[in-house]
Amino acid sequence: KAGVTQTPRYLIKTRGQQVTLSCSPISGHRSVSWYQQTPGQGLQFLFEYFSETQRNKGNFPGRFSGRQFSNSRSEMNVSTLELGDSALYLCASSPTGTGGSDTQYFGPGTRLTVL
Amino acid sequence: AQSVTQPDIHITVSEGASLELRCNYSYGATPYLFWYVQSPGQGLQLLLKYFSGDTLVQGIKGFEAEFKRSQSSFNLRKPSVHWSDAAEYFCAVGPKGGTASKLTFGTGTRLQVTL
């Protein structure tokens, strides 16, 4: 079974631009979560989508948004990029995101650099 | 609010030596507990998890962890470290009774292995 895939792997943008990152979960997984990883703040939860609905949200400004499609693929969007948005963005999928046996599996990440 | 503390930012061990990485959590009840490993430029790989039952859990690559409720700890151990174990290790907690997708991570411990 293929793992979580993220595209693109690397991205360079300039301040003020917007960016869209894509995540394809493991086949059969319906929950997709996004995390931001920076040296200063570590790994922080952005949001989670399940059945095309945002189910959980972290403490990030409204410039960060996402969506999920009917095939469970997910995208996240960051508008009006700031230098501080430079980070590794990780996507994780799990079957349902609930219950004792659910586990998140992570993709390789998208490295975003904002100049 | 839940939190995870990994007191050791950086640990160096010799190949063949034993390893223990510390993790303490703060949470109102027993959470779901995880250890992930991240190699440079890669995503997170699940090493092991604890949901309930036996407090000593076995994971991949010869790792194990012990949940100690009285100490709010979930330390990761390996009897004999291999050079390929050099990576960054993250302890994480997920809320029991809710969506396990919203993980809270520690700041990580970087493991260096000397030959």
Image (spheres, rainbow, N blue to C red):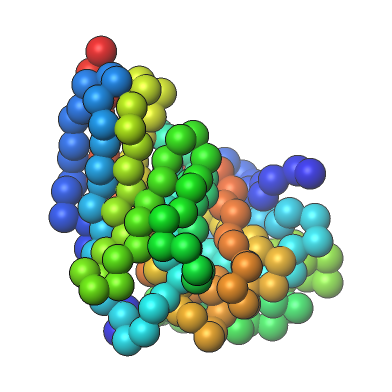
The location of residue B32, given as percent across then percent down, is 46, 71
Q: Nearer the viewer, residue A10 or A43?
A: A43
Q: Residue at x 48, y 48 (%)?
A: B58
**Relative to the observer, which residue lies in front, B94 or B17?**
B17
Is residue A9 toward the left or the right of residue A31 in the image?
left
Position of the N terminus of chain B, as image quadrant, is bottom left
Q: Kindly identify the residue that appears in the image at 50 percent across and 68 percent down.
A: B53
- Residue B28's x, y, as percent? 32, 86
Q: Position of residue A80 (x, y in %)?
A: 45, 68
Q: Is residue A71 left or right of residue B33?
A: right
Residues B62 and A77: in front is: B62
- Quadrant for residue B83, please give it: top left
Q: Quarter holding the C terminus of chain B? A: top left
Residue at the spot 29% in from the left edge and 54% down from the top edge: B75
Instruction: Determine if residue B39 is in view.
Output: yes
Residue shown at 22%/21% (left/top)? B14
The image quadrant of residue B71 is bottom left
Q: Nearer the viewer, residue A35 or B76?
A: B76
Q: Is residue B7 above or below residue A99?
A: above
Residue occupying the far front of the picture: B54
In this view, A97 is above or below A16: below
Q: Pinpoint residue A55: horizontal percent, then vertical percent.
A: 60, 83
